[in-house]
Amino acid sequence: EAQVTQNPRYLITVTGKKLTVTCSQNMNHEYMSWYRQDPGLGLRQIYYSMNVEVTDKGDVPEGYKVSRKEKRNFPLILESPSPNQTSLYFCASSRGGEKLFFGSGTQLSVL
Amino acid sequence: GENVEQHPSTLSVQEGDSAVIKCTYSDSASNYFPWYKQELGKGPQLIIDIRSNVGEKKDQRIAVTLNKTAKHFSLHITETQPEDSAVYFCAASKAGGTSYGKLTFGQGTILTVHP
C-alpha cells in the first residue's frame, strides 16, 4: 500500500529537549516536505526536499532542521523545542512537487 | 513571497445544496492550484487541481474555476452530502522551473453539511 508514515503520532516533551519526528514514504517519490498546521493559519511549509541531499526552506523554517540522506526518509529535527512549536505536523511526498500524499500527522506538545 | 487568502473560514449548508469556497493569490507567476480535503484526525488528501492554462476543471460533483486576471480560484461542490463535511484547503505554487517546491496554503474552510 502506498503511504507516508510519520512517527510518533503524539509527542509531549519539555522545552529544550531535542527531538526527531521521522517520515518515510514507499512510493519512490523525489519530493518530500514538512508542514505545520495551526488553527486559523492553515498549513505552513517548514522545509522541503526535491531529492537526496537537496533541501530548502519553506515559509517557517526557524527552529527546525531536516536532512535527506535517503530517498525514502525525511526526518524533522527540533534541536531545542520551545512552546511556540506546539503544533500538528504533517509530512508529505510527491513526484515533482504536485499531488502531495500526506502522512497522518504528529501532534507535538512542548511544555 | 506568495500569499493565499481563503474564504469563508466556516460554511454550513443543507444536504443537497451547493458549496463554494474562494481563494485569492498574490504571485502572478503561480501556475498550479490544488485543493485538499482533510477529514478529522487525518492528513489532507488531494481532491482536485488545476493549472493556469485551464479555466475550469470538473470531476463528478467537484469543480474548480480559475481567473488568472483577478488572481482567484474557487472550489464548487454540488449536491453536497454529509460525507463532504471536512476542512478544505486551497494552495498555490509555481510548478516547474527551480522554485516548484514551495507550496503556499490558504487558512482552510470548515464545511459542515447538515442532513
Image (spheres, rainbow, N blue to C red):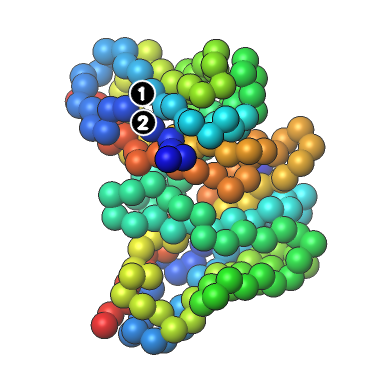
Residue lying furthest front: A1
Q: Is residue B5 visible?
A: no
Q: Is residue A77 visible?
A: yes
Distance between the Cα atoms at labels 2 and 1?
A: 7 Å
Residue under numbered circle 2: A6
> Disc 2 vs disc 1: Cβ atoms closer than 8 Å?
yes
> Quadrant of residue A47 in the image?
top right
Give the camera-side residue of A3 and A10.
A3
> Quadrant of residue A14 in the image?
top left
Pointer 2 or 1: first along the chain: 2
Disc 1 is placed on an element classified as strand
Q: Going by the image, does A12 lie left or right of B101? A: left
Q: Is residue B83 above or below residue B78?
A: above
Residue under numbered circle 1: A21
Give the camera-side residue of A47 and A39.
A47
Q: Horizontal and vertical percent for residue A35?
A: 46, 37
- Amino acid type at mark 1: Val
Q: Horizontal and vertical percent for residue B27?
A: 71, 51
Tag 2 subunit: A
Tag 1 subunit: A
> Quadrant of residue A9 in the image?
top left
Q: Label 1 neighbourhood size at 10 Å, few (<14), some (14-19), many (20+)?
A: many
Q: Horizontal and vertical percent for residue A60?
A: 50, 32
